[in-house]
Amino acid sequence: MQNEKKNDILPQFFNLNLLFALCILHIAFSSLPMKYRLSLLLLMMIVPVLFVAGQQYPKNYFRSPVSFPITLAGSFGEIRRNHFHSGIDIRTEGVQGKPVYAIADGYVARVNVSPGGYGKALYIVHPNGYMSLYGHLSRYAGAIAPWVRA
C-alpha cells in the first residue's frame, strides 16, 4: 500500500524537477538583472521543499532519539558558512556520550566515519521506507563498535 503511494508521487516529483531545471536554465541565459535571477533561483529551490512538506508522514510512528527534552543547537536549513545545514543538532547539556536511540525499528544501512561533516554517523532504514541519520556520535555501541576502526 505504501509503495503504491510512493509510485503515484514520483512521476509528479520528477515532472516538477524537470520544470524547475528548465526554469533555472532559462534564468541563467536570460537578460534579467542579477538580483532577479537570484530571487527566482531561490524561489525554484523553495517550491519543491514545500511540495514535499505537504506529504503525509506516519503519526505516532517515531520516538525521540534521546531520553531528555530536546533543545536544538542547529536547525534544518540554517545558513552555514558555505552550505545549508542538512539536519538538526540536539543539545546534550554539555555532556558527551549520552545514549542516542533509533527513532523506529529498522536496519543499519550505512556506517560512516569522517574527519568532517557528520563525523561518526549511522544510517538506519525503517520498514516504512524512511531513513534516519545519526551524526556527530562520540562512539558506536553494541555489535557495530567492533566493526569500525576510527
Image (cartoon, rainbow, N blue to C red):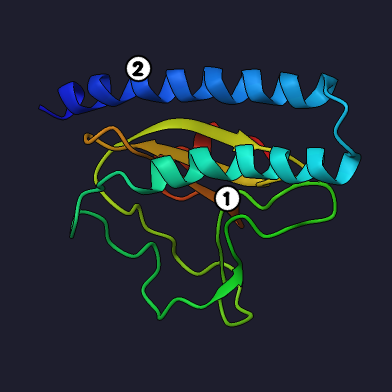
Instruction: Let me know if residue 132 appears in the view.
Output: no
- The kind of residue tagged 2 is Pro
Q: Residue at x 25, y 19 (%)?
A: 7
Q: Residue 55 appears at what percent x and percent y?
A: 30, 43
Relative vertical location of residue 104 with respect to residue 107 in this rendering, above or below: below
Q: Is 148 in front, or is 24?
A: 24
Q: Which residue corresponds to the image point at 47% horizontal and 25% vertical from the top-left?
A: 16
- Residue 119 visible in rendering: yes
The secondary structure type at the circle numbered 2 is helix
The quadrant of the picture occupied by the N terminus is: top left
Quarter assignment of residue 105: top left
The picture quadrant where one finds residue 79 is bottom right
Residue 104 percent coordinates (x, y):
26, 50
The residue under the point 19% across, 27% down is 5
The circle on residue 135 is 1
Q: Quadrant of the C terminus?
A: top right
How far apart in space, not on screen, are marks 2 and 1 (Cα)? Answer: 32 Å
Left or right placement of residue 50 versus residue 101 in this view: right
Which label belongs to residue 11?
Answer: 2
Q: Nearer the viewer, residue 57 or 99?
A: 57
Answer above or below: position of 4 versus 96.
above
Looking at this view, name the residue that lies furthest to the left. 1
Most foreground residue, 54 or 150: 54
Residue furthest front as drawn: 31
Dot 1 lies on which element? strand
**Circle nearer the viewer, 2 or 1:** 2
Lateral position of residue 50 relative to residue 67, left or right: right
Question: Which class describes the residues within 10 Å of circle 1: few (<14), some (14-19), or many (20+)?
Answer: some
What is the three-letter code of the residue carrying label 1? Gly
Q: Residue 138: percent from the left, percent from the top?
A: 61, 57
